[in-house]
Amino acid sequence: MKTSHYITKALLLMTSLPALGQQSDRSAYYSGVANTRIAFPATGAIKHVNREKPSGLLREFPMARNVKWTTTENSRKAVFTLDGLTTKAFYMPDSTFSYSLTNYTAKQLPEEVLRNIYQTYKKYKIISAKELRLPNKTSFYVILENGSAYKTIKVTDNYIEQMKTLRKSPEDQEVDWRP
């Protein structure tokens, strides 16, 4: 008698859960990212108490970790970790993804981006890099340095655009560090 009671409760609980792998407002993964609390009432159904609306974060960055939200009158910002990098994602008030920014070191940049940069700028080293991700395009803004100048370039879809060059003053110039 007790066994059938537990089986009935288990079946009720299982039928109230979404299919495995389905993104739903009932999944544990969703609740962890969306900053919700799951409560199990006596009926066995799952009830959510939303503290923050998850917006499009799950669509754009499904593997985001340690998400922290900031809300202003005109936008929402999520700061999170993804693949060991800190990313800031910005959303419109209606939760539409606007853009994201991620800082990179030279070692963290994708290989293809590095290859494209070093094919064109062999005698430069990377000082800093930032990824700008828009809904339909991703670009990397990179600051390069050699012995006599700084260059800011934009790398998008295997295309490099030189944005700015700043010559070093004679007292700041160094001997080129690359052969």
Image (spheres, rainbow, N blue to C red):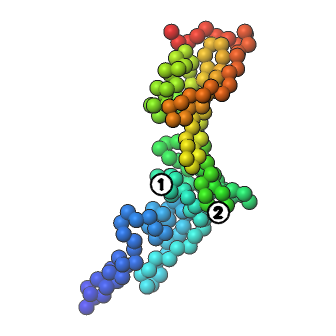
Q: Is residue 86 visible?
A: no
Q: Is residue 15 above or below residue 103?
A: below
Percent x, y for residue 17?
A: 39, 74
Question: Which residue is at a point 59% across and 46% down the rendered structure image?
Answer: 134
Q: Quadrant of the N terminus?
A: bottom left
Q: Earlier in the sequence, mark 1 or mark 2?
A: 1
Given residues 49 and 102, the one toward you in this image is 102
Mark 2 surroundings: few (<14), some (14-19) or many (≥20) residues within 10 A: few
Q: Which residue is mark 1?
A: 62
Q: Is residue 167 above or below residue 69?
A: above
In the drawing, does residue 126 fall left or right of residue 28?
right
Q: CA distance from mark 1 to mark 2?
A: 19 Å
Secondary structure of residue under mark 1: loop
Say what amino acid the circle numbered 2 marks: Asp
Q: Which residue is mark 2?
A: 94
Question: Which residue is at a point 55% across and 15% down the rendered structure image?
Answer: 123
Res 74 → quadrant: bottom right
Return the residue found at the far bottom: 1
Question: Which residue is at a point 49% across and 26% down the rendered structure image?
Answer: 116
Given residues 58 and 153, the one toward you in this image is 153
**How many numbered marks are there?**
2
